[in-house]
Amino acid sequence: MPTEIKTDAKLLARLAASTKTKASKARLRKQRVSFIYGALPSDSTITRDQIESVLGKLEA
C-alpha cells in the first residue's frame, strides 16, 4: 500500500481560494435543489421544477 500521497499544488491552491469566496444566493439555491433532487428515490416522479416551486413557497 502506498504511503506517500501526492496532491497537485495547483488543485490545492484552487481549493484554498474557493474557501475565500462567498456563494451567491442563486448558487446556493441551485445546490439546494440539486441536493433534494439527488436524495429522492430513483423511481420518484418529482421534477426539479416542482422542487423549485415548493422551495419558492417555503421561502416566501
Image (cartoon, rainbow, N blue to C red):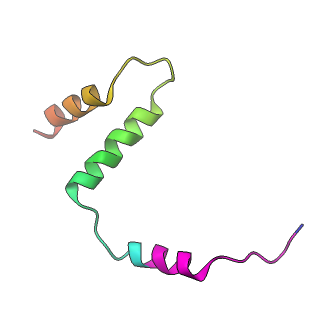
Q: Which residues are magenta?
A: 2-16
Residue 40 at x, y percent in the picture: 45, 28
Q: In terms of image quadrants, where is residue 25?
A: bottom left
Residue 1 sits inside the magenta stretch: no
- In screen coordinates, is 1 left or right of 19? right
Please state if 31 lies on the left or on the right of 53 as rendered.
right
Residue at the far left: name it: 60
Count of picture labels: 0
Q: For the N terminus, give its image quadrant.
A: bottom right
Residue at (54, 80) in percent of width and height: 10
- Whole-percent x and y of residue 19? 39, 73
> In the image, what residue occupies the spot 14% across and 32% down?
57
Say above or below: 19 vs 27.
below
| Quadrant hosting residue 56 | top left
Up/down of 51 relative to 33, above or below: above
Depth check: give the residue in front, 48 or 59.
48
Residue under the point 62% across and 77% down: 8
In the image: residue 47, left or right of residue 5: left
Q: In the image, 47: left or right of 55? A: right
The quadrant in which residue 59 appears is top left
Position of the C terminus, as image quadrant, is top left
Residue drawn at (66%, 76%) of the image: 7
* Residue 13 falls inside the magenta stretch: yes
**Which one is in front, 21 or 57?**
21
- Counting from the top left corner in percent of width and height, residue 38 is at 45, 35
